[in-house]
Image (spheres, rainbow, N blue to C red):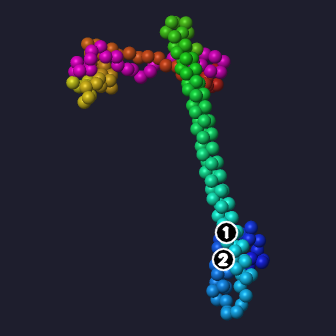
Amino acid sequence: MDTNDTNINRATLAQLSVTAAELWDSIENCPEGVELADTYAQLLDIQNATEAKVDAIAYLADQLKLDMEMWSDRLSKVTALYQVIIQRRRNQLDSLKSYLLRLYKLGLIPEQVVGTERRIDFQNNPPSVILLVEAEQLPSQFQSVKVTSANKEILAAHKAGEDVSSFAEIVTEKHVRFKHISRKKK
């Protein structure tokens, strides 16, 4: 790379390094008595351009880091904002479901409420166990290793016809489902 032919301000760091090496090589291999003032001036220009290029690269890296921090901060704020909105919507949906379940339990609406395009069903949750005795008082086959109630086993025993009424009550709650009505059934 000849500095006369190339604008050193537009050269890459690699090009500047190659040019500096070539200039040093020409200085070291220069015959005795040849004037080197122009070569030293070119080498000084290359060194100054290299220093400026290094500073520019470092500045760019700093800017990229700042941009990443800024965008990460924005992402955190947007995520937090959306989390608040999602939680608000979740609370609204839970409130709506609680309201509908209350109406159902009061007998004000039936188990299936039909609209023109949608319906609301009140379906059974999977059965759950409400213990009537402390977990330590359960028969051993219904206790887990850490002495908590083995609800699955209690439910299985209940389903198999065993009497669990002395230590547990089997309850089946309702939950709300929103479904599309099939056009085929109309």
Quarter of the rendering containing residue 95 = top right
| CA separation in Å, label 1 and label 2 | 9 Å
Where residue 50 is drawn, which disc sits there? 1
Tell whether position 143 is magenta: no
Residue 16: x %, y % from top left: 68, 72
Kindly tell me whether residue 181 is visible in this rendering: yes
Q: Is residue 101 above or below residue 29?
A: above
Quarter of the rendering containing residue 186 = top right
Q: Which residues are magenta?
A: 114-139
Q: Are marks 1 and 2 in contact (CB under 8 Å)?
A: yes
Q: Is residue 170 left or right of residue 145?
A: right
- Which residue lies at the image location 61% right of the left edge and 51% below the top edge? 65
- Which residue lies at the image location 49% right of the left edge and 9% below the top edge? 105
Tell whether position 123 is magenta: yes
Residue 89: x %, y % from top left: 59, 24
Kindly tell me whether residue 121 is visible in this rendering: no
Residue 69: x %, y % from top left: 60, 46
- Which residue lies at the image location 61% right of the left edge and 31% below the top edge? 81
Q: Is residue 107 above or below residue 137?
A: above
Where residue 20 is drawn, which disc sits there? 2
Where residue 90 is drawn, which disc sits there? none
- Which residue lies at the image location 74% right of the left edge and 81% below the top edge? 38
Q: Nearer the viewer, residue 23 or 75?
A: 23
Amino acid type, mark 2 = Ala
Quarter of the rendering containing residue 110 = top right
